[in-house]
Image (cartoon, helix red, strand yellow):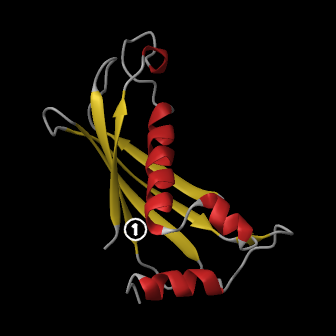
Amino acid sequence: MLSFETEVEVKFSEVDSLHIVWHGHYVRYFEDAREGFGKQYGLHYLEVYQKGFVMPIVKLNCDYKRPLVYGDIALVKITYVETEAAKVIFQYEIKKKDTQELIATGETIQVFLDTNRNLCITVPDFLSDWKTHYQLK
């Protein structure tokens, strides 16, 4: 199982009138983790694009457990979920760094489109090679 963890410090601009992180910022925290994962494991968006594909998100969920506040440092863990389908599934877990308290969990599903925005129903060759490299299939 491949995973990656990144730190996020909550900025003043990310809190709302309730003095907690606005719910939409959690999606950006997931994105930060996906970027880091991609860089570490060779599945970065620019690399995918250079191979002739884009990976739009077609499903996103986030389950909020506890709030983050200004100044908190969160750990965002992303884990790749193996599938035989022509898609990429990631699961997320956000915890407060100092207490390890679970803040949120989530999942994203991304599919592959070619440069003409056609949906790929078979796994692209580069992804098959990537899975073989990391012994995922």
State the residue at coordinates (15%, 32%): 98
Q: Quadrant of residue 116?
A: bottom right
Q: Horizontally, is 85 left or right of 101 in the view?
A: right
User: Can residue 54 be seen?
Assistant: no
Specify whether 38 is left or right of 86: left
| Residue that appears at 82% across and 69% down | 115
Circle 1 residues within 10 Å: few <14, some 14–19, many ≥20: some
Does residue 61 appear in this view? yes
Q: Give the answer, above or below, for where 126 lies relative to 25.
A: below
Residue farthest toward the left in the current orientation of the protein = 99
Q: Left or right: where does residue 22 sit relative to residue 99?
A: right
Against 66, is 122 above or below? below
**Residue drawn at 51 percent across, 68 percent down:** 42
Q: Residue at x 43, y 49 (%)?
A: 33
Label 1, secondary structure: give it: strand
Residue 13: horizontal and vertical position, in percent? 49, 16
Left or right of 92 in this view: 130: right
On the image, the x and y values in percent for residue 121 come to: 69, 83
Give percent across and percent down for residue 50.
73, 68
Comparing 12 with 18, the one in front is 12
Which residue in the protein does label 1 denote? 80
Identify whether 128 is placed above or below 107: below
